[in-house]
Every structure is written in C-alpha cells, then in structure tokens.
C-alpha cells in the first residue's frame, strides 16, 4: 500500500510511473489526496474539541473545589454538547479513514525505474540465458505422457479424489518430489536462510498484509465458515510472522525459507498450455523471504536472483531470466525477475520462479518498521522469491532428462533420491 505523504509529495511522478502498468492513475491519486484532506480536517476538529473538553474538565474541577457549583454546572452542560460533537466527528473520522484505506488498496505498487514499459509478457526483457537445450530422440514425449508411462504421477486419480489440478505423485515420482524439496531447503539454509514451518491457512489480516486481499482475481480458496484462506504461497504466512513488529536496524536482514503446499484456484485456465504439471490448483513450493534495510534491498534482490540461478545451474536445466515489464508486474511488486526453464518436449519456456522486491508496499500494510541508527522508525523493504516452485521444475527434469532407457536423475539429486534412473 502506498503512503499518503509520498503520494502528496510525488503525485505527478507516481502517475507517470504507473503509466508503465498501462494505468492512468491521476484520478485515483487525486481522490486519495481529497479523502486525506477531509480526514486531516476532521481529525483537527476532533482534536480541538477533545482539547477543549480536557480544559473544561480541569476548569470544572477547580470551580467545584472553590464552591462555584452554579458556574461549574453551566460548563458541564457545555461539555455534554461537545461530547456529542466529538462522537459525531469520531464516527466521521472512522468512515473517511476507511474510505481512504479502501482507495489506497486499489492502487498497485510503483514500478521500479528499471522496470520496462509494456503491456504483457511479450514486452518482458531477457537479462540472462544459460544452458544448452538437449537434443532428444524423435520419439520424446511430454511429461504427462512420461508420468503415465513410468507410473510416477497419476492425474486421473487426482481427478477422482478431488478434481482436475490435484495430481497424485507416487513411487519414484513422490520420492523425486521429496528430493527436490529437501535439496531446495538445504540450498537455502546453507545460504543463511532460517527454515520455518508455517500454517497453510491464514486469516484476513494476513491476506491484506501481503497484498493478496482484496482478491481482485478470485484466485484464493476461502474457507467461509471460519473466514480463513488457503495460502497461495508461503510468502503470506512467513512475511506475516513480522506483521506489526518494530525491529532494530542491527537485526536486518531477516532471512527465511519455508516449504509449503500452495493452493490457487487458477480460474479461467484452460487449454494445452496448462496441461499436466504446467498449472495446478495444489502444488509444492519452497520460498525465500527477506526483510531488508531500504539501502540494501537492491543488492539483496540481485543476491536472490543469483541464488536461484545457481540452483538451476546445479540441476543442469537450460533457463533464462526475464525482467518483467510494467503490464506483467504483479499488483504488489516494484520489480520482478522471472525464471523460466526450457521444456524440450513441449518446445516452450516454463516459469519456475519469480523473485520480487516490494520495497515498502507490503511493509506499509504490515506496519512492519525498523528503528534506524538515527532513532527514527522507518518502513523496511520486503522481498521474496520461489526457490523453487516444483511442478514445472519437475516437468523440465522429466522431459529434458528422458532417454530411451528411462529418465535420468540430475546428479545433484541422486543423494536425495537414492536412485539415478526412473525406468
């Protein structure tokens, strides 16, 4: 959520920056400033009345002590009128504050200056491409056919139990899935991230804190009876661990990693491009989260990008990194780098990670601050990244490592799997 003071100070610059998202923000920014003016004026009136009430209360006490009961009674009648006025103003203040907050919730984050303008994925910028695309045999097949051939993932059984988008991993497929999770966590903890196991359900405050709520696209699963939400990513519960905290500058950075199942409705996702593991309603993901001093967050983002790239190098999967354009940027991110693995059998790139800096956008919602060395309380910067999402990494391994004899296991995963081939 943007800060009103910064909108007031940088309205024109913000409106210009939001054009990168294809958004004409001038009207909504003006509405925010108008609502804030009303809020501040109402607050001033309320403060004046409360100050007068406080003064009258002291004066009434003095009059009673001095025996001027009649004069004190007149002032008590005046305080009654002022109290009614204060109640009215207090209600007005709550209403205008809620209206202001609702307006702020509709404005996405300001794109970083490095974010290119553009409308969709076609305008994203490739910043790196590594790895050789393997040459497969002519009879190579996509991962959903490999899964059936080697009986390692059962998509039909998932439909029977729950519905489409909930596959069942079994045998060596389940073991490979578990190996990837353990490998990712080990890489992250070795890099200094503290591992957390967190709830898979969060309350509304947590959803608002990291920007998943209001849920404009209806992608979160909602448990209506208990008013809880199934998490779309571990980013939500992990970042909310620190909601409302005031940390010391010396405590930064705070680095976390967590493995969780993730749940997304993915409404409207149909077609061959989402077949098999390409898009699921439930999937496993290992996440990294950083709470950073604003002066260090740019360098921290670069470090996260390098960290994810190193994992893909060890898996020996061909990959590329894209800097997302404004039109493809998520609502909460200031800048995002997507990682894509090339699926040789499908002849297409598959997204396996997004690494983002949210700057102060989430921190303002979370009321997450740090006490700087100058003694002032300031908003931290929050960052997160997939390290990594499993479904498309699994798809890339199955497809790119297939041979006539079976599916080879990447060398780095063999100690975790206990086998070197699926056949």
Image (tube, rainbow, N blue to C red):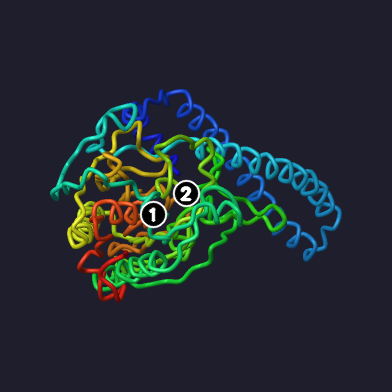
- The kind of secondary structure element at disc 1 is helix
296 w.r.t. 112: above or below: below
Q: Position of residue 161 (x, y in %)?
A: 61, 57
Q: Nearer the viewer, residue 310 or 52?
A: 310
> Residue visible at 28% across and 65% down?
373
> In the rendered view of the protein, which quadrant contains the N terminus?
top left
Left or right, 62 with reference to 411: right
Which residue is label 1 attached to?
A: 391
> Residue visible at 45% across and 29% down?
29
Q: Nearer the viewer, residue 29 or 310?
A: 310
Circle 1/circle 2 CB separation < 8 Å = yes
279 w.r.t. 370: above or below: above
Q: Position of residue 276 (x, y in %)?
A: 43, 47
Which residue is label 2 attached to?
A: 280
Q: Nearer the viewer, residue 239 or 11?
A: 239
> Residue visible at 81% across and 54% down?
72
Disc 1 from disc 2: Cα separation? 8 Å
Q: Earlier in the sequence, mark 1 or mark 2?
A: 2
Label 1: how many Cα within 10 Å (few below 14, some 14–19, many 20+): many
Q: Position of residue 220 (x, y in %)?
A: 55, 48
- The kind of secondary structure element at disc 2 is loop
């Amino acid at each position: 959520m943007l800060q009103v003071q910064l909108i007031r100070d940088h309205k024109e610059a913000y409106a210009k920056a939001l054009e990168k998202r294809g958004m004409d923000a001038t009207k909504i920014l003006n509405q925010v400033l108008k609502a804030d003016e009303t809020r501040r004026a109402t607050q001033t009136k309320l403060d004046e009345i409360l100050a007068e009430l406080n003064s009258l209360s002291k004066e009434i006490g003095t009059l009673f002590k001095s025996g001027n009961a009649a004069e004190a009674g007149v002032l008590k009648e005046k305080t009654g009128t002022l109290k009614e006025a204060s109640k009215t103003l207090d209600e007005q203040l709550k209403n205008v504050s809620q209206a202001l907050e609702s307006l702020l919730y509709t404005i996405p984050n300001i794109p970083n200056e490095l974010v290119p303008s553009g409308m969709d994925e076609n305008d994203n910028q490739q910043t790196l491409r590594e790895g050789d695309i393997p040459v497969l045999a002519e009879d190579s097949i996509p991962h959903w056919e490999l899964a059936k051939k080697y009986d390692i993932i059962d998509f039909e059984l998932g439909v029977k139990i729950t519905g489409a988008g909930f596959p069942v991993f079994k045998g060596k497929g389940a073991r490979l899935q578990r190996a990837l999770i353990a490998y990712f966590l080990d890489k992250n903890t070795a890099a200094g991230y503290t591992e957390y196991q967190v709830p898979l359900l969060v309350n509304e405050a947590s959803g608002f804190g990291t920007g998943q709520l209001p849920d404009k696209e209806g992608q979160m699963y909602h448990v209506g009876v208990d008013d809880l939400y199934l998490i779309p990513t571990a980013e939500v519960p992990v970042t909310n661990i620190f909601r409302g905290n005031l940390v010391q500058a010396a405590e930064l950075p705070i680095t976390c990693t967590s493995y969780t199942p993730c749940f997304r409705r993915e409404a409207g996702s149909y077609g061959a491009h989402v077949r098999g593991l390409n898009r699921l309603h439930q999937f496993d993901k290992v996440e990294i989260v950083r709470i950073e001093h604003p002066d260090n967050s740019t360098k921290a983002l670069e470090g996260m990008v390098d960290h994810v790239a190193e994992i893909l190098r060890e898996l020996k999967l061909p990959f590329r990194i894209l800097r997302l354009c404004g039109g493809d940027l998520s609502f909460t991110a200031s800048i995002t780098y997507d990682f894509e693995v090339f699926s040789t059998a499908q002849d297409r790139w598959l997204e396996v990670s997004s690494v983002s800096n949210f700057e102060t956008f989430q921190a303002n919602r979370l009321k997450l601050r740090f006490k700087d060395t100058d003694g002032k309380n300031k908003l931290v910067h929050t960052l997160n990244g997939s390290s990594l999402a499993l479904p498309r990494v699994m798809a890339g391994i199955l497809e790119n490592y297939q041979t006539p004899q079976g599916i080879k296991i990447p060398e780095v995963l063999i100690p975790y799997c206990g086998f070197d081939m699926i056949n």
